[in-house]
Amino acid sequence: MATNLFKCSTGIGVRLLFPFAHSELPLNFHQINSAINGNYHHLRLRNKKPKLPSARSLLWHSSSSFCTAASATDASATGASGAVSDASIDEAVPPVSDVEDQKQRIKDAADVLDIRVGRVLKAWRHEEADSLYVEEVDIGEPEPRTICSGLVKYVPLDHLQDRNVVVLANLKPRNMRGVKSSGMLLAASDASHENVELLVPPEGSLPGQRVWFGSEDDHQNQPPPATANQVLPVSNSQMLNLSFPSCKNANIIQKLVTLHEKLKSMFELKQIHALLLTCGLSQEQSLTSKILSFLALSDLGNIDYSYRVLSQLPNPTIFDWNTVIRGYSKSKNPNRSISVFVKMLRDGVSPDYLTYPFLAKASARLLKRELGVAVHAHIAKNGFEFDRFISNSLIHMYAACGDITYARKVFDGILVKNSVSWNSMLDGYAKCGDVISAREVFDLMPKRDVVSWSSLIDGYVKVGDYTEALVVFERMRVAGPKANEVTMVSVLCACTHLGALEQGKVMHRYMFDNKLPLTLVLQTSLVDMYAKCGAIEDALGVFRGGSLHRSDVLMWNAMIGGLAIHGLVQQALEIFAEMQIIGIVPDEITYLCLLSACAHGGLVKEAWHLFECLGKHGMKPKCEHYACMVDVLARGGQVTEAYQFICQMPREPTASMLGALLSGCVNHGKLDLAEIVGRKLIEIEPGHDGRYVGLSNVYALSKRWDDARSQREAMERRGVKKSPGFSIVEIFGTLHKFIAHDKSYPESEEIYMTLSYIVNEIKFDMDYRNQDYFLCTMENF
């Protein structure tokens, strides 16, 4: 005989198992799963009849065995355990017709639950989860099911062995710390969740017997249970709000959820959206929110499409508005964040504490202080001024807009600062170039993390104090946390500018030893460091070491630029050709590197072709491209053409363009033109010492000594001082700086003696070669 568990005439039936059931609304997935899945609604069966309440409170009529909670008079089916009462019921009930309609709807929902009698064959403690038991349960199937239950605190292990239980069988299997759980044991607790008992089927019940709701006739006409995909885990049920009897729609939504989790393109997203519209589920909140998140926040999404979806929602939530505002704040058009915010206010939706940080971020990216101030005013007006999360975003905004004073004012106004507050202030000073204040904040910090160290290192790199950046990194290696990608990019940049190859190799080894993933950014930094430090073969090794198909244009630019500065012009052009074959689209920097390569190799024709390609691919030449083109022509001896090129440009010539032309004029003896260009350079940059020296050298080559002397005097009258030249040499990983005419270095005497010896040897060799050449010429004559 089948065991009829959940049929009764009191509140212990479905009404109290699901106390949130309302006469006007059917149960939905979210409600059923909240009541059952993961909550172990602990019930037990009594083989006695209950005390019947009034007829108006009946849900189903029966005199058979029913389930009830053990001595639970103050119970609730909500919370962690889901307690149930057998004696309490709300006497304030709706009219009988409403009750009957409600009963039928709830019964339709409950009939698809597959609740069976089971027998625990074996139970043991979960090896990786102290709060879980694992049971093998016979529920009348060919093989027993493995089920995990969180009953360790409530039921002794020996009470689980070889006993009958009640199992919810059509839940989707879930991985519980490495064990796949295919079902759930039902039990009950009191309101305090201290007294917990397993639900006990009546004597004589057999494994596999299914529970039904209603009378014996209902048992005969009981529909088949829902599939596991229609009874969702709690984590997924929170995404659904569909009436439980609508199994067809439920199945559609679950399939759409599954498809959404595997999205790989906008095309697939639009297909899912089209299905939602076709099935009449376009207002389904959970799926709509997921679609908005993908569109607004995913790299594969489309922020403008997300706004169109938002505009079609009848009642978008603040979460939906925040999602689109956040998406625009990190897009190419951050100004749209403000527009969406204004639209949200006009629609009567009040912002929350998550809205304002995205607006502050948009203002920071736009570098519009006045916009940030307006956002700040709105924050104060709505009482969020003392929210630490918002204050931290304001510090970043003011610092990004260059108002470090007000950033500090916001920082000082935070009553309880956290690490984000300190790091935001530190990073603000660093980005504004005030490394002294940044160092003061760093020293005052109660706790320093990797962000703190990275911000300070980056600050020193930005102001050009590369040596101090490496000193701070050495301190970090000893006393601080392990470096991350941001740290290493700054450190490698410092090594690059110093030409410190050995230290660069040490940093590369540090990344390997600490198992830092070689991201695309780090790979590009390594290529750039090795190339600019003279180790072009090592740069090529790092370049070829990763998947080129997954690379970006920045890494190819670093490799092409590295080959260019080493004069390896042909290899640079070959890399460019390979880049196009793979499908990496070149940008303005790519063409700049290629023009530089052509300048070093004297490839005037190829340079003209590349310069023309800029316009063909929709890019406008910038000042740097014009300067490079002038350099190509000037180095190639086409000085007049270079001058004409400058005169025909659609923009005023810059100092770099004229500097390249001056160098070409000097190298190819065009001293008359060189004088004109030199005077123009002084006019453009009157405070630049090199411009006076350049023109003075032009006069010296023409043996116009008085004019040369006058340029030196003019420089002195204007207070322009000649910056002494210097060089940095790395010896066994240590950097040594040598300044022109400075003999304060400890071993200067030995160095200058060696240098003098080398110069004399060079002169002797040159004299010897000239003598051989003279004798050979005389013999031929």
Image (tube, grey):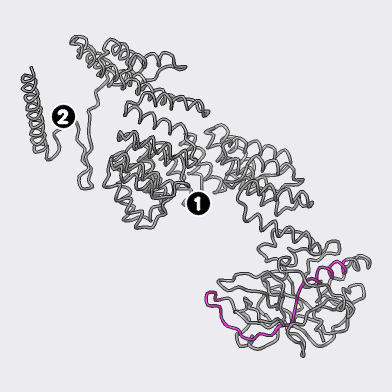
- Give the mark nearer the N terminus: 2 vs 1: 1
Residue 466 picture location, percent across and down: 31, 40
Task: Tell me the quadrant of the picture where the C terminus can be found.
Answer: top left
Is 296 left or right of 510, judged from the image as shown? right
Residue 671 picture location, percent across and down: 26, 12
Name the mark nearer the viewer: 2 or 1: 2
Residue occupying the point 20% across, 48% down: 732
Asked whether residue 757 is in view, the answer is yes
Asked whether residue 440 is in view, the answer is no
Residue occupying the point 34% across, 13% down: 640
Q: Is residue 415 above or below residue 761?
A: below
Residue pointed to by mark 2: 741
Task: Tell me the quadrant of the picture where the N terminus can be found.
Answer: bottom right
Residue occupying the point 67% across, 80% down: 195
Q: Quadrant of residue 12?
A: bottom right
Residue sitting nearer the eye, 73 or 478: 478
Q: CA distance from mark 2 to mark 1?
A: 55 Å
| Element class at badge 2 | loop
Residue occupying the point 27% across, 18% down: 719
| Element class at badge 1 | loop
Where does the magenta region start and end?
A: 102-130
Is 397 left or right of 752, judged from the image as shown? right
Q: Is residue 226 above or below residue 697?
A: below
Label annotation for residue 740? none
Residue pointed to by mark 1: 416
Is 741 left or right of 391, judged from the image as shown? left
Q: Amino acid at mark 2?
A: His
